[in-house]
Amino acid sequence: MYRKPGLGDQSDWLTKFISSIDSDKRIFRATVLTALAHQIHLFESGLIPREAILTISLLLDALNKEEEILSGGFEDVHEALESWIIERAGGLGGWLAYGKSRNDQVATALRYVTIRELISLLWEINRMRDSLIDTAFMNLEKRMPAFTHLQPAQPSTVSHYLLSIEYELFHHYRTIWHVMREVVDLCPLGSGPAAGSSVPIDRGRLADLLGFSGVESNTLLATGSRSFETILLGIISSLMVVLSRICEDLIIWSNPNFGLV
């Protein structure tokens, strides 16, 4: 749909090769919410007709046919969604794309989904921290050796070991929270393809409608960078190393030569 004017009809294998439909399932609902917020703002600003906002917003609000929409031969979720809307709204559906690009929309959807996934991760980290603290209090006087290079080094306690893990989890929790709030939680919507939009858009209002804490002010960064994901991957990789080390400790300590587990 988007590339047809320049490339003409594409064969099925080429469409499948360039399509991100399967991976776009992760951001489907966020894409719908992003489109809905954009339409609301355009209407608030008097930029689209009342009939268009009513028609499109009702279709978006009632959208629960993810499998149907994403099953077609489309390049991505944005093309599939726009085609679905136009098919049902006719010419009014063309207002769906007014003033935005796939670039700023996908960047917004990715950040929106990532924030919610991070909140779930932070919740699970805190659950583990709570369990570690509770277990540590129940084992304040239970002695165990502290090891260096698998050799008993100094006397310690079970609570000492458990709280060392809890502190390390807290460091990762605090770092993930900071990156989520200061890096990820900035809205790219309204940035256009790369250098803004010719439509007079209030990006702060779009951020408010979607629940972001602020705006990613540089439009090139907003649409072209995924560094927020690589930053998080580094932190989460570090977290996985911590969890792996705990598992290794338990495996070693379950050996009869140690007999601690």
Image (cartoon, rainbow, N blue to C red):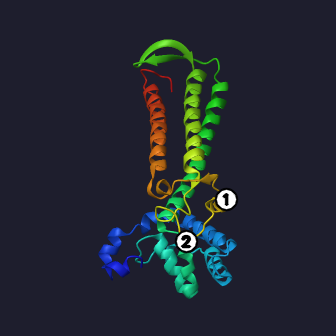
> How many numbered marks does the figure carry?
2
Tell me the kind of residue under disc 1.
Answer: Asp
**Closer to the camera: disc 2 or disc 1?**
2
Q: Nearer the viewer, residue 98 or 89?
A: 98
Crowdedness near tag 1: few (<14), some (14–19) or many (≥20) residues, C-alpha within 10 Å: some
Could you say which disc has been placed on residue 30 in the image? none
Q: Are marks 2 and 1 in contact (CB under 8 Å)?
A: no
| Residue 210 visible in the snapshot | yes
Residue beneath disc 1 = 208
Question: Separation of disc 2 and disc 1 at Cα?
Answer: 18 Å
Residue beneath disc 2 = 99
Q: Is residue 192 left or right of residue 185?
A: left
The residue under the point 60% across, 48% down is 119
In the figure, residue 88 lies in which quadrant? bottom right
Q: Is residue 179 left or right of residue 17?
A: right
Q: Nearer the viewer, residue 245 or 42?
A: 42
Crowdedness near tag 2: few (<14), some (14–19) or many (≥20) residues, C-alpha within 10 Å: many
Tell me the kind of residue under disc 2.
Answer: Gly
Q: Position of residue 251 (x, y in %)?
A: 44, 31
Report the quarter where the N terminus lies: bottom left
In the figure, residue 131 lies in which quadrant? top right
Extreme residue in the bottom direction = 90
Q: Position of residue 220 (x, y in %)?
A: 46, 56
Q: Is residue 69 above or below residue 26?
A: below
Describe the element under mark 1 as helix, strand or loop. Answer: helix
